[in-house]
Image (tube, rainbow, N blue to C red):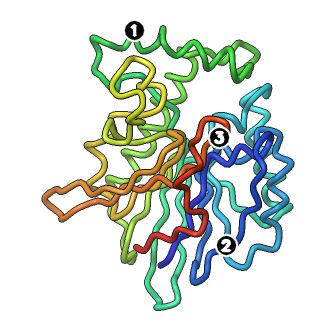
Amino acid sequence: MRLQLLSDLHLESEVFDPEPASGAEVLVLAGDIDSTWTALERFRGWPVPVLLVAGNHEFDRHELRDAWPELAARCASFGIRLLERETLTLRDARGRSVRFVATIRWPDFDLFGHAQRAKALRAATYFQRVMCATRDGAEFDAHAVRKEGLACRAWLADRLAHSAQGSDATVVITHFAPSLRSADPRYGAQPTTASFCNADDDLLHHADLWLHGHVHCRHDYRVAHARGHTRVVCNSRGLVARGETLTHDPLQCVEV
């Protein structure tokens, strides 16, 4: 199956016109598409199924509990399938069955281990400042983000522990990155990196392909394990003003 992958388009402020990639069978949107949700309409009538995993900025100035069903309804009105802690199986042109396992996978700030968690949480105060979101009426701060992240992690580990009977391949889609290997090389391993990457390396072997966004740079690497290898791909566009879009290929397709 050929998957077109886009993320971090930030269409609330960026000028970008997405186009279908030739030969793609599914479009995967790995989050931070438009914090206002307005530009989601651009994907109405897309020639192949469109799957969206929300990014953190999809919740800017929203109450988290209310935003999920509202965002799902808006996506559905444009023919987009929003996936959150859900699995979906699709067949490709060759008749192969591909299982998608999807969640935003909020960070739990344990990227560098328990001993560094407090430092990572302090560095993550930008969540509260930038998103201005709430969860059950309280500020959606780093500690609340961690609670959501642990719930995402538990769900993901449980789903991946169950073999996909009848599926020929498993694709995981998250917004946040699954490994320190996906850190933005501009910033490296510093406390704020735990706001962008999770330590989900132990889950990688369950997937044939892991797609993510959030880091505003591109990655395409393979992680070897006893079952073979897992390919990890990020095709984040980012922001023009920071020079992050220079090597972005909006028509990139990934095969699984």
Q: Which residue sits at x=31%, y=55%?
A: 221
Q: Where is residue 9 in the image (x, y as percent from the top left)?
A: 67, 48
How crowded is the residue under tag 2: few (<14 C-alpha within 10 Å), some, or many (20+)? some
Going by the picture, which residue comes out furthest to the bottom? 94
Assign a secondary structure to mark 1. Answer: helix
What residue is pinned by disc 3? 239
How crowded is the residue under tag 1: few (<14 C-alpha within 10 Å), some, or many (20+)? some
- The amino acid at mark 2 is Pro
Q: Which residue sits at x=46%, y=50%?
A: 218
Relative height, residue 123 to residue 22 (above, below): above
How crowded is the residue under tag 3: few (<14 C-alpha within 10 Å), some, or many (20+)? some
Assign a secondary structure to mark 2. Answer: loop
Q: Which residue sits at x=48%, y=8%?
A: 122
The first of marks 1 and 2 along the sequence is 2
- The amino acid at mark 1 is Lys
Assign a secondary structure to mark 3. Answer: loop
Please state if 158 lies on the left or on the right of 59 as rendered. left
Location of residue 201 by image quarter: top left
**Residue depth check, mark 1 versus mark 2: number of the one nearer the observer:** 1
The answer to whether mark 3 and mark 1 are in CB contact below 8 A is no
Q: In which quarter of the image is the C terminus?
A: bottom left
Relative height, residue 108 to residue 124 (above, below): below
- The amino acid at mark 3 is Leu
The answer to whether mark 2 and mark 3 are in CB contact below 8 A is no
Q: Position of residue 11 (x, y in %)?
A: 77, 46
Q: Which residue sits at x=73%, y=79%?
A: 47
Which one is in front, 255 or 14?
14
What residue is pinned by disc 1? 119
What residue is pinned by disc 2? 49
The first of marks 2 and 3 along the sequence is 2
CA gap between label 1 and label 2 equals: 41 Å
